Image (cartoon, helix red, strand yellow):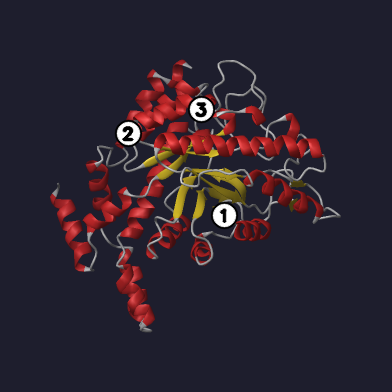
Amino acid sequence: MSNVFECARNAYQAIGVDVEQAFARLDAIPVSVQCWQADDVAGFESSAGLDGGIAVTGNYPGRARNGDELRADFDFARKMIPGALRLNLHAIYAETNGRKVERDELQPEHFSRFADWAAERGMGLDFNPTYFSHPMAATGFTLSSPDAAVRDFWVRHGIACRKIGEAFGKQLGKCCITNFWIPDGYKDTPVDRVAPRERLIESLDRIFAVDIDRNCDRDAVECKLFGIGSESYVTGSHEFYMNYALSRKQMVCLDAGHFHPTETIADKIGSLLLFFPELLLHVSRGVRWDSDHVVVLNDDLKAIAREVVRGGCEDRVHVGLDYFDASINRLAAWIIGARSMKAALLMALLEPAAAMAADETAGDYTARLAMQEELKMMPFGAIWAEYCRRHDTPEDIAWLKEVRTYEKEVLANR
């Protein structure tokens, strides 16, 4: 323990913050890291390119080509990220031993290697049905398609995925969050905005009618403002999914890149928690459009973390990352985003939140503003370095040297 950390801890103690308590609280917040950053959302299903509102920019060498490489990459990245993590899987990452298995026929056995690997590490898994990059999604519509056969296929896929999530929860003893996002929508202005949403309600109701142990799997629905190929109309809009989830007692997923370009999700968290028992966050960094840039420690991220922490809602908000950048080293993208998310949470945990709230309630906005500004000058870096040290992860950008070595010895040979 360094003298620099001792001085920093004393500085926080002087404003009423217990650093050790903040460390303990952060240890209890797992961040779910998206598997699809490792391989540009390619998955293991086929060599066909992405479609259905998904696009990845860049061609940096060394992407994971199979489950073994992806797991090895994540094991390496975990050594650079302090604190608890989970891995978030998409259905296209099924390992089928070279056999063609349709998405509506997927079983827990097709993800058993991921589950066994996670069990060895004491880590939870989350899951996502894959409603894109498939012939049955070629029209741009899946669960809200006017074609009953298409809807039936994707309903079966959704049911299969919930059962896979349930199997993860049973094996790992950590509840799986299964998140539903679909690309359905129109590029240009539609005439009938209601019928696709009526069909989506019917499809979702069929999926969620199947009994699943909620101690093992809980479901979320992810809303969106617009997407590639659905610029004018998205069936699963914000208003649709918030009302659907509230009426069906499901969870809402807020993706930081799925709103207006200048709109942030921080203010929405507290409002929704007044009506929902829990929320799922997909933390990304939208730049002008839903571009899913690597998460960085900017004001938007800090605001999200503060909203989670200030109300003591860490056990009600599931924090996940969702971005994919192939213009830089993919492991570095994982590490930068996850470390930034952890740092933002720790920064929020180091606020004297109760005292600031008391000043606010008393109408002392002077003290509130003064403390908000003082916190910007606190010696956070020394506290972060100590947290990293305690988790045997690099305290600073020394992790990049490790990534460069891994890139030279492993990624360059792919």
Amino acid type at image mark 1: Val
Relative horizontal placement of residue 327, taking residue 353 as reference (left or right)? right
Q: Secondary structure at mark 1?
A: strand
Residue occupying the point 67% across, 24% down = 48
Amino acid type at image mark 3: Phe
Of 368 and 235, nearer the camera is 235
Relative horizontal placement of residue 2, taking residue 127 as reference (left or right)? left
Please tell me in which quadrant of the rendered image residue 90 appears. top right
Crowding at label 3, few (<14), some or many (≥20) Cα neighbours within 10 Å?
many
Amino acid type at image mark 2: Lys
Q: State which tag comes first along the sequence, 3 or 1.
A: 3
The vertical placement of 157 against 213, above or below, is above
User: Which residue is the site of mark 2?
Assistant: 79
Residue occupying the point 68% across, 57% down = 240
Report the Cα–Cα distance between label 3 and label 2. Answer: 23 Å
The vertical placement of 201 against 81, above or below, is below
* Proximity of marks 3 and 1: CB atoms separated by less than 8 Å: no
User: Which residue is the site of mark 3?
Assistant: 111
Q: State which tag comes first along the sequence, 3 or 2.
A: 2
Of 337 and 142, nearer the camera is 142
Q: Please state which of the two labelled residues, at mark 2 or mark 1, is closer to the viewer.
A: 1
Please tell me in which quadrant of the rendered image residue 229 appears. top right
Q: Position of residue 353 (x, y in %)?
A: 33, 68
Q: State which tag comes first along the sequence, 2 or 1.
A: 2
Q: Position of residue 66 (x, y in %)?
A: 51, 21
Q: Position of residue 212 (x, y in %)?
A: 55, 43
Report the Cα–Cα distance between label 3 and label 1. Answer: 25 Å
User: Which residue is the site of mark 1?
Assistant: 252
Q: Secondary structure at mark 3?
A: helix
Residue 321 visible to the viewer: yes
Residue occupying the point 77% across, 36% down = 150
Of 169 and 293, nearer the camera is 169
